[in-house]
Image (cartoon, rainbow, N blue to C red):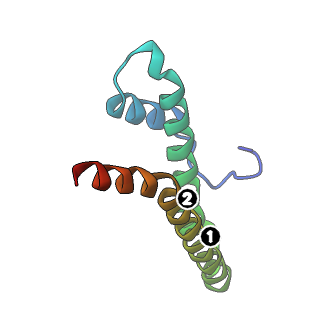
Amino acid sequence: MAKKLSFARNRLMECYFWALGMVPDEHELSNCRKGLTKVAAFVTIIDDIYDFYGSLDELQLFTEAVERFILQFETHFLNYIIKIFFPFFLLNSIYKL
């Protein structure tokens, strides 16, 4: 990937240290740190695409695609949360009565 994205910064260790600062250094949380490192590296690459690589037209299309993805994710996630937690809230309300 580094060869294909030669314009992007390669800051994997910086992203790992950032994740290490956010997540305690416990063995059980190593997967969380790895995942957070990957997310931070991905965000860094997206930032570099915006800063150095993309033309204005390409970046507008990319931004629109990301906004559509976020909107779909929020809608799906909200429906999922409502389906899972609404029965608990309902039962809790009935129990208090």
In depth, the one of 65 and 50 nearer the eye is: 65
The disc at residue 80 is 2
Question: Which residue is depicted at the point 64% across and 73% down?
Answer: 54
Q: Position of residue 7 (x, y in %)?
A: 64, 55
- Circles 2 and 1 in contact, beta carbons < 8 Å: no
| Residue that sits furthest to the bottom in the current view | 57
Using a 10 Å C-alpha cutoff, classify the residue at mark 1 as few (fewer than 14 neighbours), some (14 to 19) or many (20 or more). Answer: few
> Which sits earlier in the primary sequence, circle 2 or circle 1?
1
Residue carrying label 1: 69
- Image: 61 above or below 88: below
Query: Which quarter of the image is occupied by the N terminus?
Result: top right
How far is disc 2 from disc 1 in space, using C-alphas? 16 Å
Q: Position of residue 19 (x, y in %)?
A: 41, 34
Q: Secondary structure beneath disc 1? A: helix
| Residue that sits furthest to the top in the current view | 27
- Image: 10 above or below 74: above
In depth, the one of 76 and 52 nearer the eye is: 76
Query: Which quarter of the image is occupied by the C terminus?
Result: bottom left
Q: Secondary structure beneath disc 2? A: helix
Nearer the observer: mark 2 or 1; the answer is 2
Q: Position of residue 64 (x, y in %)?
A: 61, 81
Question: Which residue is depicted at the point 58% across and 50% down?
Answer: 42
